[in-house]
Image: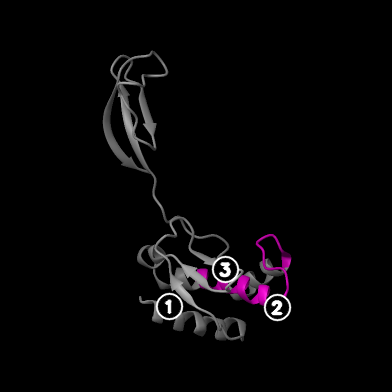
Amino acid sequence: MTNQELQALVEKVSQESFRQPFCHKATFNRRLKTTGGRYHLQSHNLDFNEMLVEKYGQEELIKVIKHELCHYHLHLAGRGYQHKDLEFKQLLKKTGGSRFTPQLATATFHVYQCEKCSQEVKRRRKINTTKYVCGNCHGKLKFLKMIEA
């Protein structure tokens, strides 16, 4: 999906679900990693995560578009646009937008094993095995594998 197709989709969803036009810019942002979309308060533009479409398809994208459009229309109307506001929650429920984005980023772990006591140690970052030792028995650590969780 291109940015032009996304723009057209956002305008269509805004007209159908909110009966109001979307007059700003909607684009994909490759820098978004854990969130599905973002509403900019200053420029009123919307950013969306490309991985959302690749992983979950257009249905989930439309739910996230509705979520961001709730922020957009409520903010422009001068009403409660934050997640904690009752108006936001009611509009989100009425339009069928998603409250939370499905998990997008997967965590990678480095797995080490103690040579002395066979204790497994998982770390997000790679560690220097000459400097760090097992917290259990102070034995030498050796790298085993990388896993995704």
Where is 11 relative to 55, above or below? below
Q: Position of residue 6 (x, y in %)?
A: 43, 78
Q: How dense is the environment of label 2, judged by Cα within 10 Å: few (below 14), some, or many (20 and up)?
A: few
The residue that appears at 55% across and 60% down in the rendered structure is 100
Marked residue nearer the N-terminal end (1 or 2): 1
Task: Characterize the magenta stretch by its predominant secondary structure.
Answer: helix
The reply, left or right, for residue 101 in relation to residue 18 is: left
Q: Report which quarter residue 90 is drawn in.
A: bottom right
Instruction: Kindly identify the amino acid type of the residue bearing the numbered disc 2.
Output: Ala
Label 2: state its secondary structure.
helix
Kindly report the distance in space between the C-alpha atoms of the residues bearing marks 1 and 2.
24 Å
Name the residue beneath numbered marker 2: 77
Q: Report which quarter residue 88 is drawn in.
A: bottom right
Number of numbered discs visible in the structure rendering: 3
1 vs 3, front mark: 3
3 vs 2, front mark: 3
The reply, left or right, for residue 29 in relation to residue 131 is: right
Label 3: state its secondary structure.
loop
Instruction: Kindly identify the amino acid type of the residue bearing the numbered disc 1.
Output: Leu
Q: Point out which mark residue 40 bears.
A: 3
Instruction: Kindly identify the amino acid type of the residue bearing the numbered disc 3.
Output: His
Label 1: state its secondary structure.
helix
Q: Report which quarter residue 77 is drawn in.
A: bottom right
Name the residue beneath numbered marker 1: 6
Marked residue nearer the N-terminal end (3 or 2): 3
Magenta-drawn segment: 63-86
Contact flag, marks 3 and 2 (Cβ < 8 Å):
no
Q: Position of residue 103 (x, y in %)?
A: 45, 55
Give the residue furthest to the front.
42
